[in-house]
Amino acid sequence: MSEAPMLSKGSKDVLAKVRQMVPPMLEKFHKGQLGRVAVIGGSQEYVYGADMSHVICEPEAAQVIKTYSPNLMVHPLMRQAHKLTQSETPETVAASVIEMLPRLHVLVIGPGLGREDLMQSTCEKVITEAKKQNLPFVLDADGLNLVNMNPDLVKGYRECILTPNVVEFGRLAKALGVEIPHTHDDLKSNQNTDEETCAKVARALGGVVVIQKGAKDVISNGTQTLVCDLEGGRKRSGGQGDTLTGSLGTLLAYRKAYLDKIWDVEGEMSAEELLMVVAFGGASITRECSRLAFKKNGRSLQASDLTENVTVSFENLIGEKEESKL
């Protein structure tokens, strides 16, 4: 095991709750109980840790992704408008994806999605139905564009996590009418600018959890704000955000297992508290993956290098329960 990172007391306390939430791997569990997660888009990053990882994408992307990993179940259900067959309509495309929802625990929407009109409108229909089924979801990358165009799509839905980077956060704040301090005087007058602005955005969305990615990750649901300031790597290659969305998808599935009490759980954490715990856990694991990958690869670091460090990052920050060990 690599050298564990330095953690503040606050970080240790929240990560202890993550550990409490994560289910042990018990012999009595059957396939699927520890997570059935689907990514809608086309990202080749998969949801590690969950029992079953689905990718819902368009046919051309499916051919590539199927060769990427045997761990993925690939469903070529999405369509761009110019590739609809004579027997397909926007309604039938959306219906084919919605049909999968009862089999899932979590949705991740956005990585590799693009902004083509039919791809976006299909996801809008899927989100509307997912809310009716109280299905948790993560919106990242091009999935965030849906919120920029129609904030009411997620407003008030407290089973949702948004993961904007600096530029995406600016667009989101603008769409919601939340002012972001830009001048040196603005920043100097308030040392907690990031925390307060993130909280304002979360409140404007009615309590949705927002992870504002940056030099430190600010996490807020509008009433509670956490800051994840674990050391990360210094290479900002594209695609590292997929490690965060994958971590969040898996931890949301573990959250469901905890709430369903499929084992003798410790304590009584609420669904709302656990959503913040999931967000902090996902951000922490991602930052530790980045730290370890950068330590090994330096300037040559690629996003895929983070995936190789998920297991050791989990061990460093959360640790495996004794019941899970052989």
Image (tube, grey):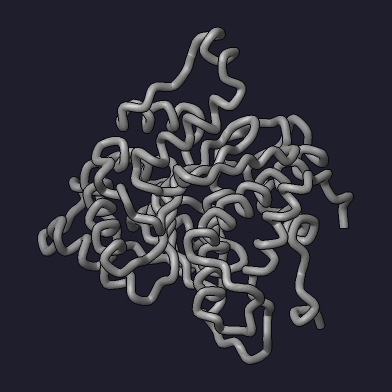
Residue 145 image position (x, y, % from top left):
33, 38
Compared to 230, does 3 lie above or below?
A: below
Name the quarter where the N terminus is drawn.
bottom right
Residue lying at 52% horizontally and 51% vertically, measured from the top left: 245
Residue lying at 67% horizontally and 55% vertically, measured from the top left: 14
Residue 233: quadrant of the picture: top right
Residue 72 image position (x, y, % from top left):
51, 66
Residue lying at 10% horizontally and 59% vertically, measured from the top left: 86
The answer to whether residue 71 shows anywhere in this view is no
Compared to 303, does 181 lie above or below?
A: above
Compared to 326, does 157 lie above or below?
A: above
Would residue 237 appear left or right of 104 to someone viewing this image? right
Would residue 116 appear left or right of 6 to someone viewing this image? left
Residue 195 image position (x, y, % from top left):
55, 33
Tell me how many marks there are: 0
Would residue 185 appear left or right of 105 to someone viewing this image? right
Q: Nearer the viewer, residue 82 or 212?
A: 212
Name the quarter where the C terminus is drawn.
bottom right
Q: Nearer the viewer, residue 261 or 109?
A: 261
Residue 230 image position (x, y, % from top left):
73, 41
Q: Nearer the viewer, residue 198 or 214?
A: 198
Residue lying at 56% horizontally and 36% vertically, measured from the top left: 213
The answer to whether residue 284 shows anywhere in this view is yes
Residue 49: quadrant of the picture: bottom right
